[in-house]
Image (tube, grey):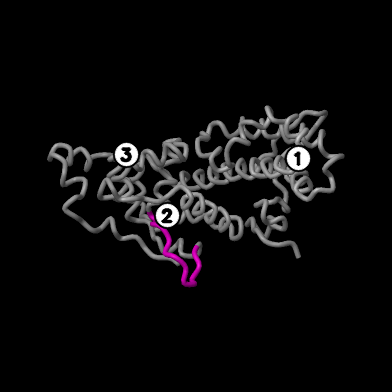
Amino acid sequence: MFRENTTHLQTSFFDIERQLSESKRKKIRESEEYNFYQLIFRKIKEENFAVLYSENGSRPNSSVNIMVSAIILAYRKSWTIKEMLEQIDFNLLTRTALGLNGMDDTAFCEATFFNFQNRLLKHFVETGENLLERVFDGLTKEQLKKLKIKTDIQRSDSFMAMSNIRNYGRVQLLIEILLRLYRVLKEEDKERFKDMLSDYTKQTSGQYIYKLERTEIPQELEKLGWIYHKLYEALREGYKEIEIFRIFERVYQEHFTVVKNKVAVKKNEELHSGILQSPDDIDATYRKKGEESRKGSER
């Protein structure tokens, strides 16, 4: 169930600024983070994101304006998810940017953030609409000019932030499929590939990408491509009748190409219309309709 967040407009005796000296309050008001709060955070029309939530009597959503702002900041600062959460918890200026008035205010939990990103990506794939980009839609030319001068934020940041979400989601999907395949392997095969898969099997796919830096993603995809190729060649005869192996094979063929035994990672724009989006939804597809990428079931 969707609801707007207006708590940042409320004041309390324990607000951060009330506990600081006048000189420090002045520094906050002159900071890039305070300008971000005024020019971006306060301008977010949370109702634009209501489409991501059920209208039924479910639990209220976490604060959309905080999560959207955190996504943009994390992209601009090249933070991992772990670093982003630490910044939100302990950095006074970051909390100012997100409208968190007190040091004990909780922004959101890790699982909530992952779910929100997944909802954004799903909506983008289904409709072609980048809701992050709409953050800038209501801004005037004068406001956009102030943004560039005061915070060095550009409209393209919203597009790149969505692309960043998509790349992280791609890595997580590939790892999740690996983990599910590993669980069904015979004990001798688990032992055979134990060292090769050890970076992944000691944690969940979400925990793995939690510390993954954006700059590491291309190298990570190359590594996964090599692993997928090795496993496919070694296991296809013995596991070809097992469902998770067939899903593994599909994902391998969707994300990678092999020329003369050399594995190459397909670019995002090369991913074909039937690409799997979730290991729990084997009928998930991309469809092209006009200029938009859509997601749905094959008919």
In the rendering, at what x and y percent does residue 110 appear?
A: 46, 47
Q: Is residue 55 left or right of residue 224?
A: left
Residue type, label 1 = Leu
- 43 relative to 24, above or below: below
Mark closer to the observer (1, 3): 1
Badge 3, how many Cα within 10 Å: few under 14, some, many 20+?
A: few
Badge 2, how many Cα within 10 Å: few under 14, some, many 20+?
A: many
Marks 3 and 2: CB-CB under 8 Å? no
Q: Which residues are magenta?
A: 53-65
Specify which label sits upstream in the sequence, 1 or 3.
3
Figure quadrant of the C terminus: bottom right
**Residue lying furthest front in this view?**
187
Determine the CA span between mark 1 and mark 3.
Answer: 43 Å
Residue type, label 3 = Phe
The residue labelled by disc 2 is 135
Magenta stretch: includes residue 10? no
In the rendering, at what x and y percent does residue 160 appear?
A: 51, 43
Can residue 90 be seen here? yes
Residue at 39% across / 60% down in the picture?
A: 45
**SS assignment at label 3:** helix
The residue labelled by disc 1 is 185
The residue labelled by disc 3 is 90
Specify which label sits upstream in the sequence, 2 or 1.
2
Determine the CA span between mark 3 and mark 2.
Answer: 26 Å
